[in-house]
Each structure stands twice: as C-alpha cells, then as structure tokens.
Image (tube, rainbow, N blue to C red):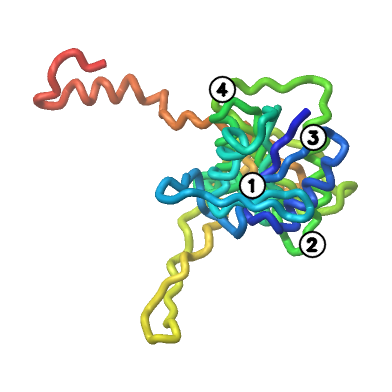
Amino acid sequence: MRILLSNDDGVHSPGLIALYEGLEGLGDLEVVAPDRDHSGASNSLTLNRPLTVEQHPNGFRSIDGTPTDCVHLAVNGLFREPFDRVVSGINTHANLGDDIIYSGTVAAATEGRHLGLPAIAVSLVNDGHFHYETAARVVRVLLESERPLVLGPRSILNVNVPDVPWDELAGFRVTRLGHRERAEGAVPMTCPRGKERYWIGAAGEGGDAGPGTDFHAVREGYVSITPVHIDMTRHDVLSSLREWVGSLPDSGEGVA
C-alpha cells in the first residue's frame, strides 16, 4: 500500500512527524506538505506562479504552496508510482463542525478524493497535552481493518481524536458534523507604524453540539469519525426551489 501523507501545519509539524512514525511499516509512505503553516487555507490552489519542491534530509518533501497544491502535485506529477490513499494530519487542533469549510487539513484529504483516492483527515482535539501518538494509532487502526470501507464518490472521513493517552479513549463513534456559534469579533491592533490592523476572531463554541455530533463525541472522550460528502447541493429543497423559480415573473418556460 502506498500512502501519501500531507497536512496544513507545515512539513516540520510534530503532528505530521508523529503520523509518519505511527504508520511506519504499514506500507510505502511519502510525505508532501506545505513549507509553512497554511491553516485556514481551505481548498485553494496556487495558480498565479509556479511552485517549488524541496526534499528534506528525512525524505519529506515540502512545497511553497497550499495543502491542496501539495496533494495535487504529489498525485499528478511528483511520483511515477500511484498512491492507494491519502492521509492528512495530524492537525494540531480540532476540525469539528463548520471548521471543515476553512480547514487546510480537510482540503488536502478532499483533493485526494477529487483525484480518485480514498482519504482521511485526522485532527487532535488539543487541550495542551499533545498526544499525537494517540491520533496516529487511531489512523493505523482504521487503515489496518481487514474489512474494506466503501464510502462512495466524493466522500472522505473526518476524524477528530481527544487529546488523551490511547488507553483513556472511550472508544469510537460515528458522528455527524455539528455547528459552531457565530465567531468572536475581529480583534483590532495598532502596528508599529501606527496603522490599524485586525486579527480574525476566535471560532465560536459548539452551538449544535448535542448527542450524535462530532462535538459531543470528543467531549465524551470518543474518537469522532464523520463521513463527509463533498456534494454541497441541498437536494431536499430542489423541488420547492424549482416551484419558486417557476413562479417568478419572466422566469420563462422549461425550468429544469
């Protein structure tokens, strides 16, 4: 099995190193990750300049681009042998609920899925203990399963792991994405040249965070495993939307 590892925290991230070490011996591992932190980059591609690839003494490769760039180049140009799957992480903080919209970790996984590869995004719900080895072991357990998992097209697994030793995990739970409350306000500051600047405010707490959600699972000490479908179409409102559009003046005939 050939596995591509990537992340959004950068090629020197301790979470990425822990993931590599935790999966050693499972197959042929290749690491292609951003040369610096790209948290919050989402699915952005670099299209306005060429990208530079650097190989490091430990064999890892870095790219001066986004997580999506890294997976795209790795699968579509850097290696002759194809990959069997993509694993992105271990992210230094949680990717719960609405976080996945912004997450570069999840974006690296979805790029792998777009290119036809099964993919997992894994994050540590960090509370300051940094038990990356627990998250790495979770991924290994998922990959070593003798029963193949079939999610269907345009789907990935989003995995969030409590920041505890392995033997303190409560277990595994299959969850849905919760939702956060509104983010905190932007934080103004003054730069040394006297100009006003702003920091983006912190993400809101879990608003929809009850039983069944990823928020609730990790709060109870469980590994949260959420199947994420990249099709953002709101299928349940298509019929009513067609009716509404058809009622508009000058909507024309033959509304599909």
Q: Which residue is mark 1?
A: 215
User: Marks 2/1: CA distance?
Assistant: 19 Å
Q: Which residue is drawn at the image coordinates 61% and 46% (left, top)?
A: 105
Q: Which residue is mark 2?
A: 129
Q: Amino acid at mark 4?
A: Pro
Amino acid type assigned to the residue bearing label 3 in the image: Asp
Q: Amino acid at mark 2?
A: His
Near mark 2 (Cα within 10 A), the count class, few <14, some 14-19 or many ≥20, is: few
Q: Is residue 68 left or right of residue 242?
A: right
Quote the CA–CA distance across marks 3 and 4: 24 Å
Q: Which sits earlier in the primary sequence, circle 3 or circle 4?
A: 3
Location of residue 196 with respect to 239 vertically, above or below: below
For label 1, the SS is helix
Q: Position of residue 213 (x, y in %)?
A: 62, 40
Which sits earlier in the primary sequence, circle 1 or circle 3? 3
Q: Nearer the viewer, mark 4 or mark 1?
A: 4
Mark 4 lies on a secondary structure that is loop
In the rendered structure, find residue 153 and report the number of the disc placed on it.
4
Q: Nearer the viewer, mark 3 or mark 4?
A: 3
Which residue has dot 3 on it? 28
Q: Residue at x 56, y 29 (%)?
A: 115
* Residue neighbourhood size for the residue with mark 4, other residues' Cα within 10 Å, grouped as few (<14), some (14–19), many (≥20): some
- Mark 4 and mark 2 lie on one chain; the one further toward the N terminus is 2
Estimate how packed mark 1 is, as few (under 14), some (14 to 19) or many (20 or more) residues with alpha carbons within 10 Å: many
